[in-house]
Amino acid sequence: MLSRTADHMYWMSRYIERAESLARLVDAHYRMSLLPHSPATLAQSLSSTMTALQMEDAYRERYDTIAPRAVFEFVSLDREFSGSIISCLRAARENARAVRGSLTSELWETLNSTWLDARALVTRGAANADIGQFVEWVKERSHLTRGVTIGTMLRDEAFHFTRIGTFLERADSTARILTAHQSDLKPGADAGAVPDPFEWTVLLRALSAFEVYRRVYRNVITPVRVAQLLILRDDMPRSLIRCCKEVYQNLKSVTNEHSAETERRAGGMHAMLHFTRMEDILATGLPEFLEEFMGKVRDLGDRIASDFLVPPAEA
Amino acid sequence: MYLSDGATRPHYVSYGEWLKAQPADRLGRKRAEADALFHRVGITFAVYGQEEGAERLIPFDIVPRVMPLEEWIRLEGGLKQRVRALNAFIHDIYHDQQILKAGVIPPEQVLCNSQYRPEMQGVDVPGGIYAHIAGIDIVRDDAGEFRVLEDNLRVPSGVSYMLENRKMMMRLFPELFSSHRVAPVDHYPDVLLDNLRSVAPTGVADPTVVLMTAGAHNSAYFEHAFLAQQMGIELVEGQDLFVRDEAVFMRTTQGPQRVDVIYRRIDDDFLDPLVFRPDSMLGVPGLLTAYRAGRITIANAIGTGVADDKSIYPYVPEMIRFYLGQSPIIGNVHTWMLRKKEDKDYVLAHLPDLVVKEVHGAGGYGMLIGPASTKAEIEKFRQMIIATPERYIAQPTLALSTCPTFAGDGIAPRHIDLRPFVLSGREVTIVPGGLTRVALREGSLVVNSSQGGGTKDTWVLEA
């Protein structure tokens, strides 16, 4: 397939996944804001999340203080801010439009109507009036998009590039959410008092991991187990290891004559997680581990771009 | 639809009865349904000069234009004849120029034309076909005769609306298609692909065909994506292609892949920055070298604009006689060429009654419709004509035929034209009908989508 087509497919699915990740974070914090507890905790969580997502500077340009309501609107609805949910939906749709002939009509229509409806919701003021409902809707649209992709697309290169985009974005997103909560995940934090349960709720809910946690561990929430679940559990769909596995497998299906090194690195990331114990990660230090992991995700993204999506001229 | 005595024309009788039986609000509802569907599917176009990324619908009219088979057969014969002659003309111009030597057309009319491409002189193209896809605009005059208003031989567009309008009509009013034998059009992409494959460079057994677009911001982008999808070929931009050793390749995820035929939807000027506009970011450097070496087919060929220019149009009937030895089945609209003194004098004396067009204009821009213009507008054109008469032609204001059209509060007559798409490859093929464009504003004669025109489904009725 055309490199440019693959590039648009890849970014289309990255943007949809990014919109969903943001919607999950807003949703979790929004629920937290409805509960009667310290506003300082909420503000702290929002602040560290925005830092981890590298959104804080853009936010500070417009607002002086971290106010939940302002953050929700900024992250969800600000069309001027290129990192917002609404901007991601637009970017996904623009990428889809550039290759609409290579998408199934169901997939194109899903992405197109998601954007048209989102724009209408914002213009009508319905999204501002009920942010909780809006982000819920965004999650549903993302689920629908993924379902339509899997349910209608030929299992060809185009499909594999959309999957690579999805899982690379998800790996990055999970790593960032963990980074935002790393202070709660320090080794030894589980030895003493139970940490703020609201914090855990936010983290786990944002990754659809709250119920999963209960199911898997049938035990009280401890930082080590949370980290274990979100980093090393292969059956947890948003865990780092799961994302790496999917990226590696899809990459193998699109292999070309330049891509051996990229595949080796993707396989290496998966193998590293597969053969690592939580104790090892905590011994190195979780922040350092996450930092290194995100660096590898970036590297992989760059390599995929030069091997497949934006080949150097005359290649 | 109606004869001058108010009776319904025979091929409209059955449809007319159906229309009369429709409850008033049903048509309005169906129209709203069509708009919602077009938006969702993204059948939109961009309007130049409007906000970046603005996408609009081409208004779709739910009342079809109906044409009996006998009329279509005659029209089809005339169109095939005309396009054969036009292709022969372009071939001749870029080879021996016999028509110029014979004095049928003044040489300076052709050789000094900005659309004449000296780069094409002596270049042989497969099958001698230059205009693989031609959109011929047809009107019916006050005597009921079909006439050619304009030939579009460069990158004619609109065929996707012909196909989508039919799909929409079948979705909205399936019952009409069981009670009427409407000739199908949906094989158009197959015929087009077959034609494009048939003109691949010699020796290529299984040619790779691509469709080249200027990109997602081009006004006709929907059509480009649609046709590429329907034909199952890659939709490429200039940046996706490169030339190496006089061969054209596209950049794919599996490395370079050879391309044999380019169905291009961008103008000559933008094709190759080394030869044409050096500032063009849309083209492929070196494309013309590959083309001249016969390693790639470009459809339509480079340089077809010399034959669809409004200053050449008046000579097309002569071309038909010269190359085919036949008399034209469909005539032209009478045209005054303002570079001729007697024509200019006549036109300047009758400006309020005439339509004046710029020779190189397109899309309904740069024209004067005398009867619909203010004194000031007419004066402005008068000055422009006096300054550079060779840049203009004039035609009588035709009493274009009208067709019933849904106008918000009911059915009313509106002016229409017809653009059939003539495909040339191994043979010349036309799917029955074409794109009917309709001037939606009451009394308006301009059917261009950029100027408030809409489209309708076109039915050739087999019985």
Image (cartoon, coloured by chain):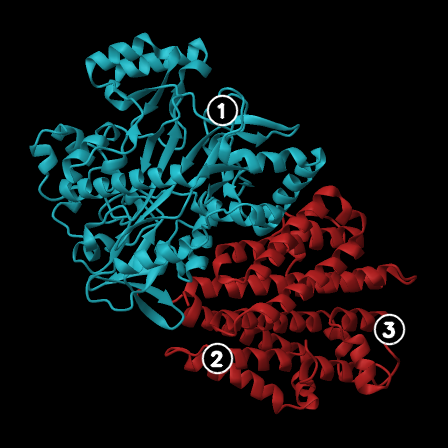
Chain colours: A red, B cyan
Identify the mark nearer the N-term, 2 or 3: 3
Q: Are marks 1 and 3 on the same chain?
A: no
- Locate the N terminus of chain A by quadrant: bottom left
Do callouts 2 and 3 mark residues in contact (Cβ within 8 Å)?
A: no
Query: Mark 1 to mark 3: distance in Å?
Result: 82 Å
Q: Is A191 left or right of B412, judged from the image as shown?
A: right
**Classed neighbour count for the residue bearing mark 1: other residues with Cα under 10 Å, few (<14), some (14–19), many (≥20):** few
Label 3 residue SS? helix
**Label 2 sits on residue:** A253
Q: SS of the residue at dot 2?
A: helix
Identified by mark 3, the residue type is Pro
> Which chain letter goes with mark 3?
A
Observer-side mark, 1 or 3, equals 1
Provide residue A177's location: percent of width, then percent of height.
70, 70
**Left or right position of A21 against B444:** right
Q: Which residue is mark 3?
A: A197
Q: Inspect the image, locate mark 1, and give the three-letter code of the amino acid beneath it.
A: Leu
Disc 1: which residue: B3
Find the distance from the CA under tag 2 to the CA under tag 3. Answer: 42 Å
Residue drawn at point x = 77 percent, y = 71 percent: A203
Q: Which of these two is toward me, B327 or B233?
A: B327
Tell me if residue A267 comes above or below residue B385 in the rendering. Answer: below
Q: Does the image show residue B39?
A: no
